[in-house]
Image: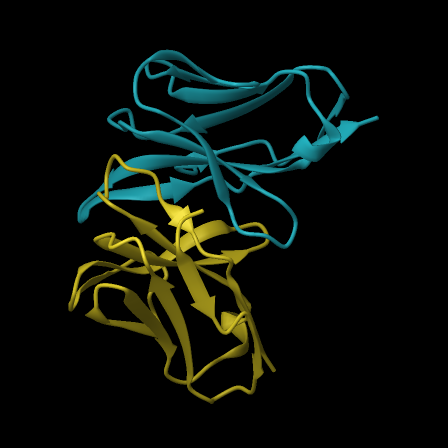
């Protein structure tokens, strides 16, 4: 089992719709969770982080965390073509040498006109 | 944007040659990281540093060495480059390892022929 799993997509949504991106993780003791956006040929850009169970909203973005079920999701409201990118989920996973930030392979989002 | 500069941005070299990539930060952050990103594997940690002259291995450290002689600079060296090290390399920084998010540089695209 991969430590952080994401559906690779592509996930296609029409402009103006809600995009829902999901991520599951293996370490029940993980404490911090991050969502990055990466445009093709560019570096990952942090868009959200969440530490506590529940929802965290920032503009059109909402991160949702459920530690009991070991999943974290990202909702993008009113999706725009400029949201088309790969979204990376990152989770702090405990290892023998301490915590390390482990990335999923990303979900490609396509917002269609 | 976090003040992170990677150099060079692109490099093509031959198998067996030494290669050094540089990461320079202006944020005075304690932690610095080197990742590689390959299709199907996502971002994988090569080495990281938690202070001047303090470094440790990540999950894919074989064939790589690092040095940090100043807070602002973190160097990644491929002693004898191999074609399997063709990749995009990202440097990242964070204030605190576990809870704080990491911010990424623009990346170095390295091709080894």
Which of the 4 image quadrants contains residue B55?
A: bottom left
* Number of numbered discs overlaid on the protein picture: 0
Seen from the viewer's position, the closer of residues A14 and B16 is A14
Identified at 39% across, 55% down, the residue is: B3
Question: What residue is drawn where x is 56% and y is 87%?
Answer: B14
- Answer whether residue B63 is visible to the viewer in this image: no
Applied colour scheme: by chain
Tell me the colour chain A is drawn in.
cyan
The quarter holding residue A109 reads: top right
Residue B60 x, y percent position in the rendering: 37, 61
The part of the image, by quadrant, that contains residue A81 is top right
Left or right, A31 with respect to A16, comes to left
Q: Is residue A112 above or below residue B32?
A: above
User: Is the C terminus of chain A in the top left, top right, bottom left or bottom right quadrant?
Assistant: top right
At 80% from the left edge and 27% from the top edge, which residue is drawn?
A112
The percent position of residue A98, horizontal first and vertical second, equals: 18, 44
Coordinates of residue A59 in the picture (x, y in percent): 53, 18
Seen in the picture, residue B79 relative to A41 is either above or below; the reply is below
On the rendered structure, is A58 left or right of B94? right
Q: Point out residue B82 in the picture as x, y percentages from the top left corner.
A: 49, 79
* Colour of chain B in the rendered structure image: yellow
Farthest residue, direction right:
A113
Residue in the foreground of this view, choosing between A97 and B3: B3
The reply to whether residue B12 is in sight is yes
Spot the residue most to the top: A54
Q: Residue at x 25, y 34 (%)?
A: B99
Q: Quadrant of the N terminus of chain A?
A: top left
């Amino acid at each position: 089992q991969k430590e952080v799993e994401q559906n690779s997509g592509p996930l296609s949504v029409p402009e103006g719709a809600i995009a829902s991106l999901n991520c599951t993780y293996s370490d029940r003791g993980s404490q911090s969770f991050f969502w990055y956006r990466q445009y093709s040929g560019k570096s990952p850009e942090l868009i959200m982080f969440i530490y506590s169970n529940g929802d965290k909203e920032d503009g059109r973005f909402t991160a949702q965390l459920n530690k009991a079920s070991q999943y974290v999701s990202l909702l993008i409201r009113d999706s725009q073509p400029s949201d088309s990118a790969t979204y990376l989920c990152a989770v702090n996973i405990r290892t023998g040498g301490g915590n390390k930030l482990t990335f999923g392979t990303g979900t490609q989002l396509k917002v269609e006109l | 944007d976090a003040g992170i500069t990677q150099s060079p941005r692109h490099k093509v070299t031959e198998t067996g040659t030494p290669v050094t990539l540089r990461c320079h930060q202006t944020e005075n952050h304690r932690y610095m990281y080197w990742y590689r990103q390959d299709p199907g594997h996502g971002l994988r940690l090569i080495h990281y540093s938690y202070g001047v002259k303090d470094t440790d291995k990540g999950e894919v450290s074989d064939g790589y060495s690092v040095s940090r002689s100043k807070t602002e600079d973190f160097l990644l060296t491929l002693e004898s480059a191999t074609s399997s090290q063709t990749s995009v390399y990202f440097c990242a920084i964070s204030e605190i390892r576990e809870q704080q998010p990491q911010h990424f540089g623009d990346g170095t695209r390295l091709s080894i022929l």
